[in-house]
Amino acid sequence: MSKDKKRIDSRMKPPPGRTIKSGAAADTLDDLLRFSFKFYDADHAEFHCKDREPEYFRKLLERIKELSREKISSLTNRKADRVLRFHPVDFADERVSQPGFSIAGWEEYDEDAWQFSLSKSENGRVHGFLIENVFYVVWLDPRHRLYSKD
């Protein structure tokens, strides 16, 4: 398997529980957002940050710190926030450059894909999926290429 088509081991099964879209319990929605890099794909051909300056990583960590203080319910129910841009990703949208995350055995979580921005107009987006109150980071997209399909 090539580096660019690296897949996550399909033996890693999702934890029990419901996802946000399928209706998480109220107590889950009131929990603070947490992050996991369990599925982070650092070697993706389009979504990598190999050429980023240290300032990019500072902004990434600052945004994660900020979001870690938020309840998942406030993020997923928020009206359009032009700075944060925390919203679902629809891989069926013709503007989206990828068919899904391509995580073997986890394809159903493509339907629970979300993204958020690092800053208002720079530094791109972070893409992943939600299970209860955990945002699983899959791709860092500093060039905002997910929605740039030609």
Image: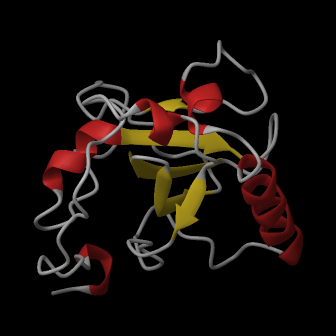
Q: Position of residue 128 (x, y in %)?
A: 44, 52
User: Residue at coordinates 15% horizontally, 53% vertically from top-left?
Assistant: 107
User: Residue at coordinates 43% horizontally, 79% vertically from top-left?
Assistant: 43
Above or below, comparing residue 143 to residue 37 in the picture = above
Q: Position of residue 1 (x, y in %)?
A: 15, 87
Q: Is residue 73 left or right of residue 24?
A: right
Residue placed most toward the observer, 127 or 25: 25
Q: Position of residue 92 (x, y in %)?
A: 23, 28
Above or below, comparing residue 143 to residue 60 in the picture = above
Using the rendered view, name the quadrant where residue 77 is placed: top right
User: Residue at coordinates 28% horizontally, 35% vertically from top-left?
Assistant: 91
Position of the C terminus, as image quadrant, is top left
Looking at the image, how many numbered discs can be counted on the residues?
A: 0
Q: Is residue 94 left or right of residue 83?
A: left
Q: Position of residue 49 (x, y in %)?
A: 62, 71
Above or below, comparing residue 79 to residue 121 in the picture = above
Above or below, comparing residue 21 to residue 37 in the picture = above
